[in-house]
Amino acid sequence: MNCKKLCILIIIFIIFTGVSAFATDPENSISNYDVSVRINTDGSLNITENIKFTSLRGYNNVAIFIEKQDGEEIEINNVYMLDKNGYIECTEISQEQWDINAFMGTYSITEEFGYLRLKVYGRFSSDNGTVVVQYTVKNAVKRYYDVAEYKRTHIFKDQNNYISNIDISVYLPIEANMGLVKSYLHGVLVGRKYFENNHIINFHIPDIVPREYVEARVVFPENIVFNAPYSDIRPKLPEILQEEEEYINSDKSDLLRARESAANKAGRRAMAEKLAQRARITFSILSLIGSGIGLYVLFKIHKKLRKLKKLPLPKDLRHIVRLTPAEVRFVISRGRTGARCIMASLLHLVSMGALEIKTVPSKYIRSEHNRNIMVFSIKEGLKPSMSLSEAFLYELIASAVKIYGEFNPDMLWEKAQKTEEAQELKSYYDEWESRVLKEYFGKNILESDLVFYRNLGIITGAFLFFAGCIIPVAFSIWAGYLMLPVGLVLFMYSIRMQKYTDYATTQYAVWKEIKHRFSSMNIDLSNLPAWMGNGSVLLSYAIALTAEKNPAILNEILDLGVNEVILNDYDVMQLSQLIKQTMHIMTMAFSSVQDAN
Amino acid sequence: MQYISQYCLQVSPEACKQYFIVEKTEYTKEGIKDNMFENFLWMLLFIILTVWAGLHFVKKQPKMIWFVILSELALICRFVITFVIFSSGTDTTGTDGLIYHLVAKDVAKQIKSGIPIWSLEYKFTWYTLLVGIQYAIFGVNRYAAAFTNAFFSILTGYFLTDIALNLKFSYKKSSFIGIAYVLMPSMMVWTADTRKEALTFLVTVVTWHVTLKLLKEREWPKYKRILNISLICLLLWVSTQLRLYMLFTLGGGLFVSLLLHYIKTRRKSTLVFGCTVFIFCILVVFTTVFVNIENHHALPKAAEETSDEGIKSEVNSIIDIILSKDIPKAINGFLTKPHLEDVPDITDISGHNLLIALVQLEMILWYLCMIIALFGILDTFLRWDPYLLGIIAFMISYTLINALLSEEVADTYYRYRAALVAPVLLFADYRPLVNRIRNIITRKTLY
């Protein structure tokens, strides 16, 4: 690989891989985190957590962490998830639960060090999901000699989530004097707490970032939880106040760093998202422009060719360009050759006196009346001047005659059924076809402006095809896919545009006209070129034009006289059947080998 | 013992590990040593089989012996990976591989208790049944099942190389395709465990291989053709049992290929082949797909709605899933995830810098491979090769189905996409198209 190719590949590669980074997914984030804690008189808690996720990466499950301190017992009462039809109650995955429903609206609990991991499995959409968890925590409130203490971590330091609007409401079992209730919030720099209706302590944290945590602590008179056992009979308040004093004076640089880091990360993500958004918009516009350019080039080429198509048909067909029957077939069928093309060439060689025809019954025709097909052999004498493709065909027939004594189409079908011989036959066919095309396209040379348009079309088409495959995938944009069909159509059209050139369209029109005259039984030799001047030649061209299927035309041709005596012995129907059967064998053989290479 | 579906395992392997109540078997660390001799015999068997099969595939080209040697190396690498993966015990390690192994053990127990094969109860995938049969015959040994997968993977490489040779690619290019396939790092990991990937890829590649042979070989007697068509039908059914949607992707690709082939060649044998595949696919839709669709765990949202309303609801659910997706983003995800920056987050390799670098390198090579394959794909359109066009149809349908229906999880995409590696490698050559275009644009005529 030389440097140039390598550079091109590297550029394409960088474009492709570099942009994949734009398609970053946001981390899981939570837009609302409401916690309602009801303290019971026995020191247990009834907690309801209502969590609204706004973006989920692995959207078929979410994890919720529940603190479990020493001596606590946690019982999950209810888990709900919001479905499109409302809340559905989730069930815990049971043992021996085999079926797929095990992970639709279910939850699992795993106990890890210091917390429970509650995983809810369900039908979350990729960008939102709401889960409600209700659970009871026994022995949660610590009752001391002087005060009772509620202290829980609601959001863990390692939870690694972005959470907004955290509201924690702690309900005391009975009303209490405001002055005797103290509340503390740990783990965040910004947060608000307030006492409401003498028994509700509210905490509001606008948002937290990864590495921050939320710990709520409420200290209240111990007689409020009068049914709870004492954890310790010593006074605790001074110790609590001391701890809180220490917390206030503690180094909170880790929280600051977490904020900074989150801000930096958010900045980077915002920048990446902005760049991605810009890239998407830019490439959407570029895709539309690219598709537009592609369509414009297609239109220009088409217009140019349409212009050429409007060239008038020559009134006098005697001076038309001489084409062999094979070329005529190629022109009239818009680029196909096949068995009909070969048959026309063979009969043209017959009309030139290079080959002669015999008829023999075919092994492969199933008919009770007539199984005859044409076989060809070399006619001794002067070798007429032949076109490239006909000379090649003649040589092939000659070599077959040398081995088998004649060229029988049955032999083609037999070859087509053997793997290696089929490949050989296909290579002969390809060689012959390439000569037909070479002859034809040797005359059908593109003008320089058409060469320019063709090359422009090919290059633009290929470029748009590649861009249409790469850009929409790399940037996740719909508009990019537009380039794919535009590029493919432009590429194919440009590659095949020689079919629609001045020369090609004229030839097509001329031979269509001749075909029309054949079918309207208007075969006036005086109005046709001299080189089509006898019945034998006309027969070969009629085959190329698919006109021999009409018995009346065949009759007309026979009336003009064919130089092969044997054909003169046949009536129209017999000749028609003979041609049909011969061509049937050849069609089967040559179609069959189209995939052999 | 409790089983947890692949659905859960893909997203939370660590939680699943917590949930397994592990049965104590002989395959603990101590047990491994005791069974080392048995494992050694298994490895030796597969090494010999690899050499034998390799020599059979390259018998026409003795120079390709290095190809067999490299394949052998790839097999040994897989053995090493298997030992590394199972180093903490065969009954506790892995995600999908572990669950399939545990289900297979249960299947083996059922077989040993006298339950006939057709009445066996198995879950998740037909692969568990096959492994269960292996366990029942040769004894429960997860290593042996993993080694079998490794061998299947090497066989896939051989068949892929043979496809390339039959497409008249040079020996050098064909063997490069095969070697690239067997040495691809992710391919090594997916096929060195008791996962179903190795068998799925083998079935896919063998199906295309037999199809190519059927299209190319003209001298095969009728009975041989019928046998091979039957084999393809069987493989289609097996692939459907392994992954439900494979019927549509593989069957669809085959149908496109055969239809275009018939249009081009008008061969009756192709018509018969195509009609057989079509009719068989319809039969499988009714007898296998509709029966199993409700339990198809790859559909993230489907199951709950199906219990009452059946297929109609399932189809509606599938449509809902598709409509809920950002399609260009889903296609991006399937073809390009895990993105380079996300590789360190893959649970299985998190923290292993070497593995992370290896996966990142593979992703870069994969991106390159896809870009180069575009040249081959455009060239195929130009040549209008029915066989390769069928493979393109398979790749497109496989991509779309996975992108639109699979979970949006990088690891899942990474694993499911591996089925595309083999066909994409067949197109990964820029030279034919570049030469063709260069030939055209430097001339004033086409020929």
Image: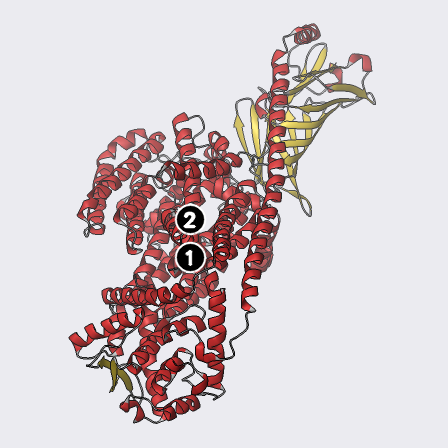
Q: Chain of mark 1?
A: B
Of tags 2 and 1, the one toward the viewer is 1
Q: Residues within 10 Å of mark 2 (few under 14, many from 20)?
A: many
Left or right, B274 with reference to A289: left
**Nearest to the observer: residue A509 or residue B168:** A509
The residue at 31%/88% (across/down) is A367
Q: State the colouring used for the structure image.
A: secondary structure
**Amino acid at the residue labelled 2:** Phe
> Which amino acid does the dot numbered 1 rest on?
Lys
Mark linked to residue B375: 2
| Rendered image: mark on residue B444 | 1
Q: x, y (%) of residue A345?
A: 33, 76
Horizontal and vertical percent position of residue B439: 38, 53
Mark pair 2, 1: CA separation: 23 Å
Quadrant of the image for the C terminus of chain A? bottom left
Q: Nearer the viewer, residue B96 or A482?
A: A482
Can residue A139 be seen from the camera position used here? no
Q: Chain of mark 2?
A: B
Could you say where residue B424 lies in the image, as x and y percent from the top left?
40, 48
Q: Element at badge 1?
A: loop
In the rendered view, tell whether residue B188 sits above or below residue A561. Answer: above
Circle 1 Cα neighbour tier, 10 Å, few/some/many (<14 / 14–19 / ≥20): many
Which quadrant, please, contains the N terminus of chain A? top left
Q: Nearer the viewer, residue B191 or A527?
A: A527
